[in-house]
């Protein structure tokens, strides 16, 4: 695919190559790779990288580029983690009862000679 038909869009300090939406359908053969069914992807449908996501919509299998996870310790990684946490939604679990029998009240704890 010519580079002139691709555009770059920055996403959280990274770039994802966008490909033209319209590509003619092409017949491909299915084959077995061990216990898995596989398909050889023609060059014009090639995705960059080594990871992809697949899902079924009716009789269609949708294959798309998996988003890169940002490098640990970066601001992009923080935003990615917060987004993943937000997808979980609020926790509906009840807070467990914690027995405090036998524990000293907080103001009776002696921290030693260093405490004011």
Image (cartoon, grey):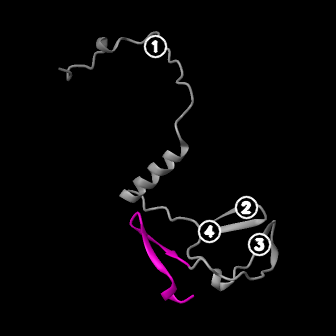
First in sequence: mark 1 vs mark 4: 4
Res 15 quadrant in image: bottom left
Q: Nearer the viewer, mark 3 or mark 2?
A: 2
Residue at image location 74% in from the left, 83% down from the top: 26
The residue carrying pointer 3 sits among few (fewer than 14), some (14 to 19) or many (20 or more) residues within 10 Å by Cα, namely: few
User: Which of the marked residues, 2 or 4, is nearer the chain's N terminus?
Assistant: 2
Q: Residue at x 70, y 79 (%)?
A: 41
Disc 2 and disc 4 in contact, CB within 8 angstroms: no
**Label annotation for residue 56:** 2
Q: Nearer the viewer, mark 4 or mark 3?
A: 4
Q: Which residue is mark 3?
A: 38
Q: Is residue 69 magenta?
A: no
- State which region is magenta: 1-19
Whole-Å distance between the Cαs marked 3 and 2? 15 Å
- If you read the primary sequence from the N terminus, does the residue marked by circle 1 or circle 3 appear first? 3
Q: Position of residue 52 (x, y in %)?
A: 62, 67
Residue 31 position in % (x across, y down): 82, 75
Callout 1: SS: loop
Q: Does residue 52 sit above or below 46 in this rendering?
A: above
- Which residue is under mark 4? 64
Which residue matches tag 1? 100
| Kind of element beneath mark 3 | strand
Mark 2 crowdedness (10 Å alpha carbons): few <14, some 14-19, many ≥20: few
Which quarter of the figure is the C terminus placed in?
top left
């Amino acid at each position: 695919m010519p580079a002139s038909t691709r555009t770059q869009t920055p996403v959280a300090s990274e770039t994802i190559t966008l490909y033209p939406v319209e590509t003619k359908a092409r017949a491909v053969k299915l084959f077995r790779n061990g216990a898995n069914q596989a398909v050889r992807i023609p060059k014009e449908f090639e995705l960059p990288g080594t990871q992809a996501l697949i899902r079924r919509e009716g009789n269609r299998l949708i294959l798309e580029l998996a988003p890169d996870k940002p490098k640990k310790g970066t601001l992009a990684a923080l935003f990615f983690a917060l987004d993943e946490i937000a997808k979980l939604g609020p926790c509906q679990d009840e807070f467990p009862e914690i027995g405090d029998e036998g524990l000293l009240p907080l103001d009776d704890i002696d921290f030693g000679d260093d405490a004011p």
